[in-house]
Image: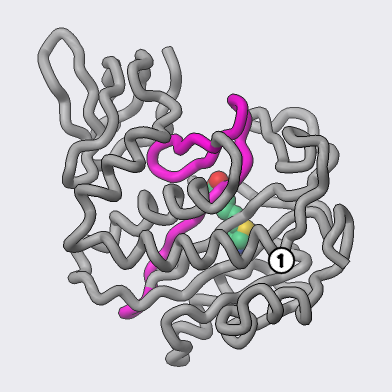
Amino acid sequence: MSEAGGEWDGQLLADISPELAGRVIFLEECASTNDEARRLADLGAAHGTLVLAEKQTAGRGRRGQAWACPVGEGIACSLIIRPEAPTPLWSRIAIATGLGVAESLDLPVEVKWPNDLWLNGKKLCGILVESTGNAVVVGIGMNVNVKKFPEGLAHPATSILLETGTPASREVVLAGMIERVIYRTSQIEGEFGSLISSWNTRCALRGKLIRCLRDGKPITGMMEGLSLSGELLLRNTEGLQRILQADEIRLV
Ligand code: BTN
């Protein structure tokens, strides 16, 4: 069954993408798919292995936050990537993943640096990228058919169902997004410039006044997008500021 609140349909996934279905490790329940994927990566699991769980009991978000999703209504998965690119470029995987997931949906999904996905001003998907040994684990939490979100979330959240009024097949969404993420994350070395151009066209905050923390100090400026090497570009009275790492970005 692939409707809202349904169970994963392995046969449907195999019909859509036999290659992906052969690489999926499906768990009814686990603490966090990122933890499982890291464990498997440390044991030598291959590039492209996907850990998919119906229920996470301790799903993790960025900055130590929790991530939860009603059973049967979302996608919680972690993809093991063994990059060919050198380690200093691995930080680009977060940007590539956000873009890949956004592009896989036939919806006006925007990216928010470094890798939240927004739809109509609300958070649709969260991404948690972690590395272990010579692998990178890309955790994706996608609100596919979620009907109701808890009060008091840090950001307003939404789902494909809430925005379109129609339940989406989780198998179709999953297969499309993983295929695109694998493609985009393979571009972090030679084709990163074209990846950045595509990212900039989807940037939710481009042209907006934003504030973030750089080295613990607040900095404000007009967001100009990402540079060709992935730095956040802010223009303020002191000129163009290039920010490699920043804490939570906020609209001013
Ligand atoms: C965020 O927006 O803070 C990131 C959320 C990432 C959630 C996903 S769900 C699958 C994977 N397993 C986890 O424990 N977290 C990620």
Which one is in front, 98 or 87? 98
Residue 144 to residue 217: above or below: below
Where is residue 65? Give x, y as percent: 59, 46
89 part of magenta stretch: no
Residue 60 can be seen in this image: no
Quick one: quadrant of the N terminus?
bottom right
Quadrant including the C terminus: top left
Residue 84, relative to residue 129: is it above or below?
A: below
Q: Is residue 41 above or below residue 153?
A: below
Which of the 4 quarters of the picture holds residue 6? bottom right
Depth order, front residue of 140/9:
9
The response on whether ligand 1 sits within 8 Å of label 1 is no
Range of the magenta residues? 109-135
Whether residue 131 can be seen here: yes
Residue type at mark 1? Glu
- Based on the picture, tell me whether residue 115 belongs to the magenta stretch: yes
Going by the image, does 197 lie left or right of 205? left
Instruction: Give how far across and how far down residue 230 sits, in percent.
Output: 23, 44
The residue closer to the viewer here, 221 or 22, is 22
How many numbered marks, from 0 up? 1
Q: What is the x, y in percent for residue 212?
A: 35, 26
Foreground pick, 4 / 234: 4
Question: Which residue sits at x=43%, y=67%?
Answer: 182
Seen from this angle, which residue lies furthest bottom? 43
Identify the image's colour scheme: rainbow, by chain, secondary structure or one colour.
one colour
